[in-house]
Image (cartoon, helix red, strand yellow):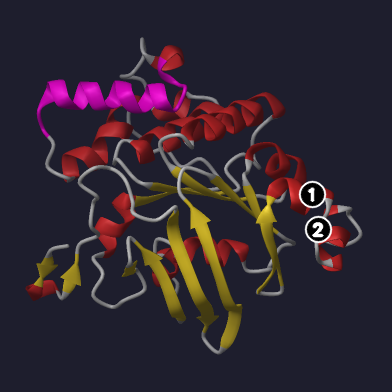
């Protein structure tokens, strides 16, 4: 890792061989998150495996989105928010004050609930951050645009209209464009906050297929209120309730034989 003394930051390390020593991409230890005096996440500890899909489920206001946003420090943007504990990424505590948050968010990208393409062309949506990062060569940008759109299963649909506004795309296409925009920055982890909740069933299915396909190259953490979605696409599922991690296990076990009564009650629709 490289220290940038004048900014008191530490760049997030990029493994030279693309592999991590551990089977876990992230290790969370006794994480607490506060909004002012209110505690939203209560001492959570869990491991997130690499090249897997981890689903976070639970009723509204249970802390799952707050937890998700802590993984790339998005909560820093909320006045009064603070965190205690550790989130280890490549053995580096990303909650440390001397983390280069900009570098972190390249390594741990995020896609939000509502598609948020820039009011630019499809091409410019992908290249905007790349140019900001110093990549200017046209041939390299072209290659990265195609690669990202292919990985997001969108290339064949937009390859002949890259100069058109991203806002002309359907909602499902816009969300896949946002995923492609994230992929273009070469992340290791992709965070998804209810990425298909605003989409029609066909678009939702395409996003789900995409998520399953992407896990061979990325580690994915997804917040979802859709129990069927969690059961279809995730490898492990964490059930949150009132800021607590109630249960965390393989998805098949969570949905067929949970260990905690509250988990079974939520999944069966008795509350939430």
Which labelled disc corresponds to residue 126? none
- Seen in the image, is 61 located left or right of residue 8? right
Q: Where is residue 61 drawn, in percent x and y?
A: 68, 68
- Crowding near the residue tagged with mark 2, few <14, some 14–19, many ≥20 C-alpha atoms within 10 Å: some
Taking the spot 34% from the left edge, 68% from the top edge, the residue there is 94
What residue appears at the point 12 percent right and 42 percent down from the top-left corner?
Answer: 134
Q: Can you see residue 239? A: no
Residue 70 position in % (x across, y down): 46, 66
Q: Which residues are magenta?
A: 136-155
Q: Residues within 10 Å of mark 1 (few under 14, many from 20)?
A: some
x 74%, y 62%: residue: 59
Asked if 191 appears above or below 206 in the picture, the reply is below
* Residue 147 on the magenta span: yes
Q: Which residue is mark 2?
A: 258
**Residue 10, x across and y down, in percent:** 19, 68
* The N terminus: image quadrant: bottom left
In the displayed structure image, the side of residue 153 where residue 238 appears, left or right: right
Kindly state the secondary structure of the residue where label 2 is placed.
loop
Quadrant of the drawing holding the C terminus: bottom right
> Quick check: 59 above or below 257?
below
- As displayed, is residue 162 above or below residue 76? above
Is 171 left, or right, of 188 in this rendering?
right
As helix, strand or loop, the secondary structure at mark 1 comes to helix
Q: Is residue 262 magenta?
A: no
> Looking at the magenta stretch, what is its main secondary structure?
helix
Q: Disc 1 vs disc 2: Cβ atoms closer than 8 Å?
A: yes
Q: Which residue is mark 1?
A: 255
Looking at the rendering, which quadrant does residue 228 occupy? top right
Report the residue at 47% width, 33% height from top: 214
Extreme top residue here?
160
The front one of 96 and 197 is 96
Tell me where residue 62 sits by quadrant: bottom right
């Amino acid at each position: 890792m490289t220290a940038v003394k004048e900014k008191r930051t530490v760049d997030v390390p990029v493994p030279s061989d693309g592999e991590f020593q551990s089977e876990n991409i992230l290790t969370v230890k006794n994480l607490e998150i506060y909004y002012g005096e209110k505690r939203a996440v209560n001492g959570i500890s869990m491991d997130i495996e690499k090249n897997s899909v981890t689903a976070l489920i639970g009723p509204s206001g249970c802390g799952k989105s707050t937890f998700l946003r802590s993984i790339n420090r998005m909560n820093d943007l909320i006045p009064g928010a603070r965190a205690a504990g550790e989130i280890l990424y490549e053995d580096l505590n990303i909650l440390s004050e001397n983390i280069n948050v900009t570098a972190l968010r390249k390594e741990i990208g995020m896609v939000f609930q509502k598609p948020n393409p820039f009011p630019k062309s499809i091409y410019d949506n992908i290249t905007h951050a790349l140019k900001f990062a110093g990549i200017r060569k046209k041939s390299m940008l072209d290659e990265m645009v195609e690669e990202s759109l292919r990985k997001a299963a969108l290339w064949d649909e937009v390859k002949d209209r890259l100069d058109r506004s991203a806002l002309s795309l359907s909602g499902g296409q816009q969300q896949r464009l946002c995923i492609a925009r994230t992929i273009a920055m070469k992340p290791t982890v992709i965070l998804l906050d209810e990425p298909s909740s605003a989409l029609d069933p066909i678009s939702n299915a395409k996003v789900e297929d995409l998520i399953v396909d992407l896990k061979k190259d990325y580690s994915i953490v997804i917040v979802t209120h859709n129990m069927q979605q969690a059961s279809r696409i995730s490898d492990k599922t964490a059930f949150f309730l009132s800021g607590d991690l109630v249960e965390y296990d393989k998805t098949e076990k969570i949905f067929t034989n949970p260990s905690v009564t509250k988990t079974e009650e939520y999944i069966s629709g008795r509350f939430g």
